[in-house]
Image (cartoon, rainbow, N blue to C red):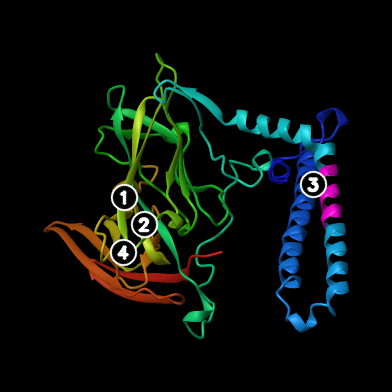
């Protein structure tokens, strides 16, 4: 029975010889999977009912209830035979094509890499329906989803753990620096396992990396990254070639950040992981944030002009997330611009509900660098607004709070 149910959890589809389009085969696969899932749910519900029906009765009622027990047994056996036959029919009708479609889906993301020493999966494989899963679909979940929700007390919401990605660096490189990097780095979390971009550049907008100390310029995530089951960081990076050399693959593969089931988390923790593929070893530094809320930050210039850097950290982990760097903002003429709303490289930070969010704002003047810090106390909803004068500029800083959950 376990083998049959396990097989039904594989991907299903009609044969291409039937003339179905890929979308029709996917729809067929999903329908059959839903049918199998419903049968299993009925079986599990039957098991629960059976346990209740066979509770120990009082001795005085044993003879009186005998006929009822026999009727229950017959009914249970009939139901078992029914869902068994339904599962068996699905297996006979779709089984061979299920296995073929599953194999085809796996082969699409299987690759060989000398640095890995063999074949490996370059993209996420731990999904409900691999054959129908779109590895390139961007997560539609926005930030600030629960900002306007009113909670009466702590029982009205639940906090989960989250991840802050600090840096993605080339820890080692099989060729010399500098290199011109383009491609993607994405995160996939428990909310939908779809693409949450951390780095995304096309070939004509490649980033120059001069040493292993330089990080990719991260421009995400656009929302809080939940850590419930495992979270994944997936790289697909290339080196832009010149007239004499073709483009080369720099890093291609997937890293796993262990989910909460594998942890006993008492405090926020700073961690790192590495991926050795193609021409590099990529090092990712991140924080696991306990009981996290999502802080979405925006900064506006109220008076004057602002040029400088804005970064964020929390009271327990001082590693900084770079939110803005005016040196990276240029007009077509090459001159810095100072818009009313300051463009942030990324605007979302996960914060432990019992800690503080610290924003550091620096600006450069003729007299040197001026740095100021603003503190915000996390909340599960609502927003906070503060003003700061630094150098010749007055800035308005808004933080919008939300929980991170399904």
Query: What's the CA distance linking mark 3 and mark 4?
Result: 44 Å
* Residue that numbered label 4 is attached to: 267
Closer to the camera, 284 or 384? Answer: 284
Q: Residues within 10 Å of mark 4 (few under 14, many from 20)?
A: few
* N-terminal label among 3 and 4: 3
* Residue that numbered label 2 is attached to: 288
- Taking the image as drawn, is residue 326 in sight? yes
Mainly helix, strand or loop, the magenta region?
helix
Q: Residues within 10 Å of mark 3 (few under 14, many from 20)?
A: many
- Which residue is at a point 76% across and 58% down the rendered structure image? 43
* Residue that numbered label 1 is attached to: 271
In this rendering, the answer to whether 169 lies above or below 359 is: above
Q: Position of residue 68 (x, y in %)?
A: 86, 73
Query: What's the CA distance linking mark 4 and mark 1?
Result: 12 Å
Start and end of the magenta stretch? 80-89
Considering the numbered disc 2 on the image, is that residue within a helix, a strand or a loop? strand
* Quarter assignment of residue 245: top left
Marks 3/1 in contact by CB < 8 Å: the verdict is: no
Q: Position of residue 295 (x, y in %)?
A: 41, 66
Seen in the image, is 323 located left or right of residue 10?
A: left
* Residue that numbered label 3 is attached to: 32
Query: What's the CA distance linking mark 3 and mark 2?
Result: 38 Å
* N-terminal label among 4 and 2: 4
In this rendering, the answer to whether 99 lies above or below 49 is: above
């Amino acid at each position: 029975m376990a083998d049959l149910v396990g097989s039904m959890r594989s991907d299903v589809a009609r044969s291409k010889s039937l003339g179905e389009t890929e979308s029709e085969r996917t729809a067929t696969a999903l329908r059959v999977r839903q049918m199998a899932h419903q049968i299993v749910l009925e079986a599990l519900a039957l098991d629960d009912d059976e346990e209740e029906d066979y509770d120990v009765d009082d001795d005085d009622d044993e003879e009186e209830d005998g006929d009822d027990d026999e009727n229950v047994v017959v009914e249970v056996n009939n139901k078992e035979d029914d869902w068994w036959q339904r599962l068996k029919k699905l297996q006979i009708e779709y089984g061979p094509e299920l296995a073929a479609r599953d194999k085809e889906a796996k082969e699409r993301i299987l690759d060989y890499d000398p640095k890995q020493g063999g074949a490996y999966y370059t993209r996420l494989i731990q999904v409900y329906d691999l054959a129908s899963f779109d590895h390139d679909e961007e997560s539609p979940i926005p930030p600030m989803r629960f900002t306007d929700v009113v909670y009466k007390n702590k029982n009205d919401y639940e906090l989960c753990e989250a991840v802050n990605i600090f840096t993605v660096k080339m820890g080692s490189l099989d060729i010399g620096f500098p290199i011109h990097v383009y491609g993607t780095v994405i995160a996939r979390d428990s909310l939908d396992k779809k693409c949450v971009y951390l780095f995304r550049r096309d070939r004509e907008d490649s980033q120059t990396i001069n040493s292993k100390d330089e990080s990719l310029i991260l421009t995400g995530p656009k929302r809080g990254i939940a850590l419930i089951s495992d979270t994944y960081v997936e790289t697909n990076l290339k080196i832009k070639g010149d007239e004499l050399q073709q483009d080369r693959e720099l890093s291609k593969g997937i890293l796993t950040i262990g989910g909460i089931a594998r942890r006993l988390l008492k405090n926020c923790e700073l961690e790192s992981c590495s991926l050795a593929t193609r021409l590099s070893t990529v090092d990712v530094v991140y924080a696991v944030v306990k009981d996290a809320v999502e802080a979405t930050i925006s900064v506006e210039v109220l008076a004057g002009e602002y040029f400088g850097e804005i970064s964020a950290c929390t009271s327990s982990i001082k590693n900084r997330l770079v939110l803005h760097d005016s040196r990276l903002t240029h007009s077509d003429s090459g001159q810095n611009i100072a818009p009313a709303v300051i463009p942030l490289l990324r605007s979302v930070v996960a914060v432990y509900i019992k800690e503080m969010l610290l924003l550091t704002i620096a600006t450069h003047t003729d007299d040197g660098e001026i740095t100021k810090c603003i503190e915000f106390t996390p909340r599960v909803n609502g927003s906070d607004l503060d003003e700061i004068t630094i150098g010749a500029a007055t800035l308005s800083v808004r933080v919008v709070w939300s929980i991170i959950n399904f």
